[in-house]
Image: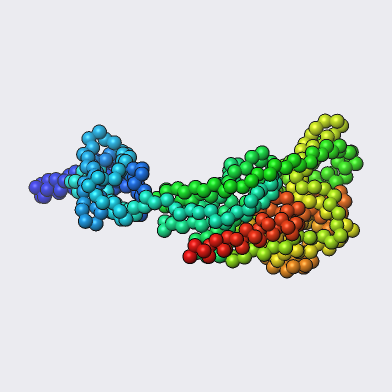
Amino acid sequence: MKKSRNGLYIAVALVAIVGVVAYFIYTSERFERIKPTIEAPSILYWNLKKPLEITISDNVALGSYSITMSDGRKRVMLDKQELTNGKKRVTLQIKPPVDLELKDRAVLEIEATDKSFWNFVGNKAKKVVKLYIDAKKPQLNLINNSYAITKGGSALVIFECRDKNLKDFYIKTNFGKKFYAEPFYKEGFYAALIAWPITQRKFRADIVAFDKANNRAKVHIPLYLRNKRYKVSKINLTDSFLQGKIAVLAEDYPEIAMLSLEEKFRFINEKLREANEKLIHTYASKVPKRRIDNFVIKPFYPLKNAAAVASFGTHRYYYYNGKLISESYHLGLDLASVKRAPVRASNPGVVIFADYNGIYGNMPLISHGLGLYTLYGHCSTLLVRKGDRVKVNQLIAKTGNTGLALGDHLHFGVLVQGIEVRPSEWMDKRWIKLNITQILEEAKRIIDTQE
């Protein structure tokens, strides 16, 4: 009986010891079971101009790594290291091997082990990366463009862009704005409207293209720059205006209820204006992706028998009691005729916004394609809804004085990819012919001769 008990105690002790050892192995870093991480995508495009950067890491310590490359006929060892310094992370620069012919494709194999005693040899990780070799920059050719661009105005550009691994392309400007192009006429050709904002003193535009291997092509757009001076207006604010229109607008914003009339005006003219214009720019920045063969546009004439009562581009300075308190730019053309006059669409398009928009009041915004948009502010009545397709001469609204407007009139705005431009250009039949219609027709003839 005693021997039986002793055997039981020994068995229990052995089980306990085994349990403790198992627990130690299970929880010890020396026996951890997490594989190293190899930071690399499964597919990489490589222009051979810069080393490939591969990072290998482990949660405790790396043990070894090896890197091989194959061109389909020959396989070479690029690097192999045993690590003894307990590093958790190494970043490797993989250069093109001189003894491989890297012309089109290759395969990169990375293997790594850690310092763990698990499985006696540690945890292993392996990554196979398909390499696509591309050392050729995208094909980028300027086909045609408007001869000139005026400060505050628009221009048209047609170009060719091709690459089997094309990643992105756009028109880059000196002020940070990117203009995107719409497919035009035949495969590989594109058209884009661009704009020179009135707030920018200089203008430069370049077409840039990038492929997946980071090859880059760049072509300058040779535009004759026509600088234009816009009006400066000094406006003295009256108490009746501040206590009337401004006070009424301010009622919609309880956060400014305790501000003075001067501060309320500054909020509406600056903060609210900024928010309203941000909405407009967001809606009017999109460019269609479908291919077009033509872009037929007629002069815009939204209000019959109207007189211009405020110009585009005027830099307005507002004074109260002899002190400058705020400023803004007038980014449209104000037209007036009679109260609640009919506003009509001069060109077909799609209504992308039709609602109240702060200082612009009731405002339809219409897309006409190629990144061209028209805006109709201060309307009393909206006769279209978002998503409506409008036809030429369709009644879309009636003039009014909603928003930051004193008298009944129409604020007519034109935008190119979210940039306000001179409405007068798009109301001029000759300008449209020289800068849009003829440029497109000439571009098609050039494209046809290339085939």
Q: Quadrant of residue 144?
A: bottom right
Task: Specify whether residue 100 is in view.
Answer: yes
The vertical placement of 227 against 213, above or below, is: above
The residue at the point 31 percent across, 55 percent down is: 105
Left or right: where 404 falls relative to 26: right
Q: Quadrant of residue 384?
A: bottom right
Q: Depth check: give the residue in front, 167 or 401.
A: 167
Left or right: where 178 falls relative to 341: left
- Residue 439 x, y percent position in the rendering: 62, 58
The residue at the point 82 percent across, 39 percent down is: 233
Q: Depth check: give the residue in front, 63 or 268.
A: 268
Left or right: where 166 falls relative to 107: right
- Residue 114 x, y percent position in the rendering: 25, 43
Q: Depth check: give the residue in front, 347 or 376.
A: 347
The residue at the point 79 percent across, 39 percent down is: 232
- Residue 429 x, y percent position in the rendering: 74, 59
Question: Which residue in the rendered view is the most extreme toward the front?
Answer: 449
Image color mode:
rainbow
